[in-house]
Amino acid sequence: MAIVNEYARQVLPGQIQNLERLQFGWKVDHDNDNWVTFIAMTGGLGIGKADPYLLRLSYEFYPATPPSALFVHPETRKRGTLEEQKKFWPKVINNTSGPIPINVSTDNKVGGYYICFGYTYEFQITHNENQHIWKPDRHTVLATVAHIQQFLSGKYYGGYIEC
C-alpha cells in the first residue's frame, strides 16, 4: 500500500470525483489501495489530432507537494525505458513563457521524462525551492490535471516525442 497522509485520504476522493465530473472526455480510474489515479486523456484536439495519453498521478506527499504526474504506457501502465517513453510522451514546442510554462524534460532523479511545471512533484525534486509555485492551501490535483490538458490541447503541443 502506498504512503498517503490522513489529510490526503480525506480530501482526495472528492477531488477525484470532481475530475470524473468534468467534461474533458477523461476516463478516470482510481486505485484506492495504492492511491494511484490513471486518467486517459487526448492530445492535439486544438490542431485536429486525437492522440491518446495515459496520465498516472500518485500522492505520496500531497498536498504539501503537488501530485506526481507522469505519462505511462496506455496498455501496460508502466513507465518503460527512456527509449520506450518517447513513443507515449508528448513533445512541447517552444513553451518558455506564459503564466505557468510547461515543458517535458528528462532527469535521472525521476527515471526519464517528466512534466516540467510547478504543479508536479517531479518539478519540485528537480528545481530549486525558490522556483516552487505550488500552494498546498490553494492548489489541488485538479489544477495539475487541468494545466496538463490545456497543454495537450494548445499551440505548444507537438505530438509524440517520437512517432
Image (cartoon, helix red, strand yellow):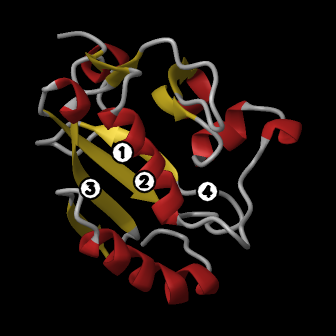
Foreground tag (1 vs 4): 1
Q: What residue type is labelled 1?
A: Gln
* Residue occupying the point 42% across, 72% down: 1
Horizontal and vertical percent position of residue 75: 11, 42
Task: Name which residue type carries label 4.
Answer: Pro
Vertical placement of residue 74 versus 5, above or below: above
N-terminal-most mark, 4 or 3: 3
User: Which residue is identified by label 3?
Assistant: 39
Q: How far apart are marks 2 and 1 (CA)?
A: 6 Å
Nearer the N terminus, badge 1 or badge 4?
4
Does dot 2 land on a helix, a strand or a loop? Answer: helix
Q: Distance between the residues labelled 4 and 2?
A: 11 Å
Disc 2: CA contacts within 10 A as few (<14), some (14-19) or many (>=20): many
Q: Quadrant of residue 77?
A: top left
In the rendered image, residue 20, in percent from the top left (x then y), is placed at: 26, 72
Residue closest to the eye, 156 or 78:
156
Q: Nearer the viewer, mark 1 or mark 3?
A: 1
Name the residue nearer the viewer: 22 or 128.
Answer: 22
Q: Is residue 36 above or below residue 74?
A: below
Q: Are marks 2 and 3 in contact (CB under 8 Å)?
A: yes
Residue behind mark 4: 66
- Left or right of residue 148: residue 86: left
Residue receiving disc 2: 145
Residue found at x 58% / y 22%: 107
Q: Is residue 43 left or right of residue 127?
A: left
Quadrant for the C terminus in the image:
top left
